[in-house]
């Protein structure tokens, strides 16, 4: 029992690791933790919606059941606004960034960017989904509303990032630039318990994760890399294993623990791929680098890209260093 360390305790213990530590970032992470618990509770009930609705639940009263991604967006936003550590939020769910109006919020130093429920198309079929978040210090003056410049910072300016995976267990994984730590939720106690301290991802992996249905639309370098993964070369541990859930947080989480690569390249129809630089790629890039891996757009480091718009998309290759470098080499040779 005495060995259990909760997320709350761990954050306090590590407070001195935070850049410019003053307790505010700890409080911000606590808001995320709270919203995660509320969203987790709702996701666990997702399959029951039709049943309870048929027996006189809210739907029968004519009220639209709120979609879970909208629900998650509202809860995370509300939790972040309530504690006055954040002056604004940008979300994959909203067209524009939101600047919190309260005077106390405008005195806050941080902005948060998030994908409140990534992979939400998987909910109907009981497959894991996740929340991704990314934290920056504002660049606009404290005491004024948050501006677009606060949100359009390159990933290398992140002060914290992480995700929650609502899976067979719910976990929260985060970094503040001093390693990656994972916490597993105990629903009976209502706490996240430290389960994975200082996670490191293997330098080499043998899992590749990509939507191969798009094969004929991929750049030649990616096609060649897929064939490389599939070749029968036992002395090099190939063929690799193909695993694709279609839920970035889940695919990333598995590959982080086991070693592997997740790829969402440009395609003939989507020249910048599908994933969003600010809400999905940068936070995952910060985490993987902190775990000893690599994140690339196929040419260079994801976190060095200077964003030009909030919902910008970018090709994404993330995971074990040697695997990401191999794709980059193929793309350089066969663009
Ligand atoms: P979303 O933010 O609309 O949920 O889309 C992001 C998701 C990722 O979780 C997943 O890896 C990817 O889209 C799957 O896309 P595809 O169906 O094209 O393979
Ligand atoms: Mg998403």
Image (tube, grey):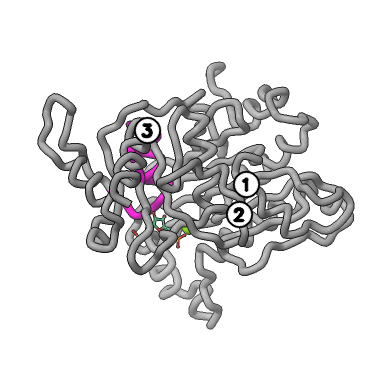
* CB-based contact (under 8 Å), mark 1 and mark 2: yes
Residue at the spot x=55%, y=41% of the render?
162
Q: Is residue 259 magenta?
A: yes
Q: Which mark is residue 320?
A: 3
Residue 334 point in image, percent of width and height = 28, 49
Mark 1 vs 2, N-terminal side: 1
Secondary structure under tag 3 reads loop
Q: Is residue 71 left or right of residue 248?
A: right
Residue at mark 1: 154
Residue found at x 89% / y 52%: 143
Q: Nearer the viewer, residue 56 or 172?
A: 172
Query: How would you rate the neighbour count of disc 1 (Cα within 10 Å): few for under 14, some for 14-19, many for 20 or more?
Result: some
Mark before the other along the chain sequence, 2 or 3: 2
Q: Is residue 306 above or below residue 64?
A: above
Residue holding disc 2: 307
**Looking at the image, in which quadrant does ligand 1 appear?**
bottom left
Q: Residue 118: horizontal and vertical position, in percent?
A: 47, 56
């Amino acid at each position: 029992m005495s060995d259990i360390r909760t997320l709350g305790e761990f954050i306090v213990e590590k407070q001195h690791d935070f850049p410019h530590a003053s307790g505010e970032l700890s409080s911000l992470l606590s808001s995320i933790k709270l919203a995660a618990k509320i969203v987790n509770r709702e996701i666990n009930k997702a399959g029951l919606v039709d049943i309870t609705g048929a027996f006189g639940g809210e739907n029968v009263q004519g009220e639209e059941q709120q979609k879970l991604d909208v629900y998650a967006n509202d809860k995370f936003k509300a939790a972040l606004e309530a504690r006055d550590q954040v002056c604004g939020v940008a979300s994959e769910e909203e067209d524009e960034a939101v600047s919190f109006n309260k005077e106390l919020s405008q005195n806050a130093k941080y902005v948060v960017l998030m994908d409140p429920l990534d992979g939400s198309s998987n909910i109907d079929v009981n497959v894991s989904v996740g929340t991704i978040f990314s934290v920056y210090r504002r660049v606009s003056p404290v005491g004024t509303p948050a501006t677009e410049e606060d949100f359009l910072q390159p990933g290398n300016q992140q002060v914290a990032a992480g995700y929650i995976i609502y899976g067979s267990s719910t976990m929260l994984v985060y970094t503040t630039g001093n390693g990656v730590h994972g916490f597993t939720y105990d629903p009976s106690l209502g706490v996240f318990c430290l389960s994975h301290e200082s996670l490191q991802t293997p330098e080499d992996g043998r899992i590749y994760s990509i939507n191969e249905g798009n094969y004929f639309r991929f750049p030649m370098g990616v096609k060649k890399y897929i064939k490389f993964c599939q070749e029968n070369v036992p002395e090099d541990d190939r063929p690799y294993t193909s695993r694709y859930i279609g839920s970035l947080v889940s695919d990333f989480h598995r590959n982080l623990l086991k070693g592997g690569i997740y790829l969402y390249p440009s395609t003939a129809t989507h020249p910048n791929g599908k994933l969003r630089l600010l809400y999905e790629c940068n936070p995952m890039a910060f985490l993987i680098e902190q775990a000893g891996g690599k994140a690339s757009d196929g040419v260079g480091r994801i976190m060095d890209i200077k964003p030009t718009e909030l919902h910008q998309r970018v090709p994404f290759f993330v995971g074990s260093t040697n695997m990401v470098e191999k794709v980059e080499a193929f793309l350089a040779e066969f663009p």
